[in-house]
Amino acid sequence: MSTMSSERRAAERQSKLSKQACEVLRLAYACMAERKGIIMTPALLEAWSSYRKASTVNQYAQKFRLWTQYCLQEGIEPLPVSEGQLAAWLAAMALSDKTASPTDNRCVAIMYFHKIAGGKRANLNCTSANKVHQKSMP
């Protein structure tokens, strides 16, 4: 099994990220950098952006866009996530879902960016989200 260099992997994934995903990642990492006193550089953003497959991050970014629209309507910041606000949004969105899967997917997507931003682990009952939170992040 061959391994790719981290620079090559980052370049490959970065080139496949949608414009929307790049913007959300920049927002999340900027939030984290501010909270932790880190100076965000393009190289650091590129390296951190290679943590997940581009297709996954692109899907997460689509769901995050919906969360951002809700936050704008409510007058709250999208990152870090307010647990109560996220739960209310997930519940409202779930009303039109036929299964729990879309709700889990939304929860995982939002919590992915929340975790990048340095937010505390939320106490939400999303089966899939618990698996994501157990993975280490940069």
Image (tube, helix red, strand yellow):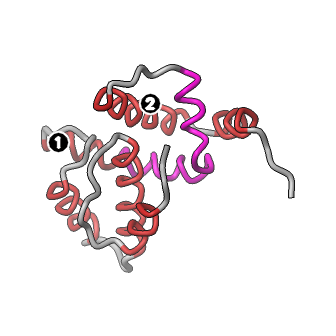
Q: Quadrant of residue 117?
A: top left
Q: Residue at x 46, y 51 (%)?
A: 60
The mark that comes first in sequence, 1 or 2, is 2
The spot of residue 129 in percent (x, y) is 39, 66
Side (left or right) of 4 relative to 105: right
The stretch in magenta equals: 42-65
Residue type, numbered disc 2 = Arg
What residue is shown with label 1? 73
Kindly check if marks 1 and 2 are in contact, taking CB atoms under 8 A apart as contact.
Answer: no
Q: Secondary structure at mark 2?
A: helix
What residue is shown with label 2? 26
In the depicted view, which residue is nearer to us: 29 or 19?
29
Figure check: 93 above or below 45: below
Figure check: 87 above or below 37: below
Q: Quadrant of residue 39?
A: top left
Residue type, numbered disc 1 = Gln
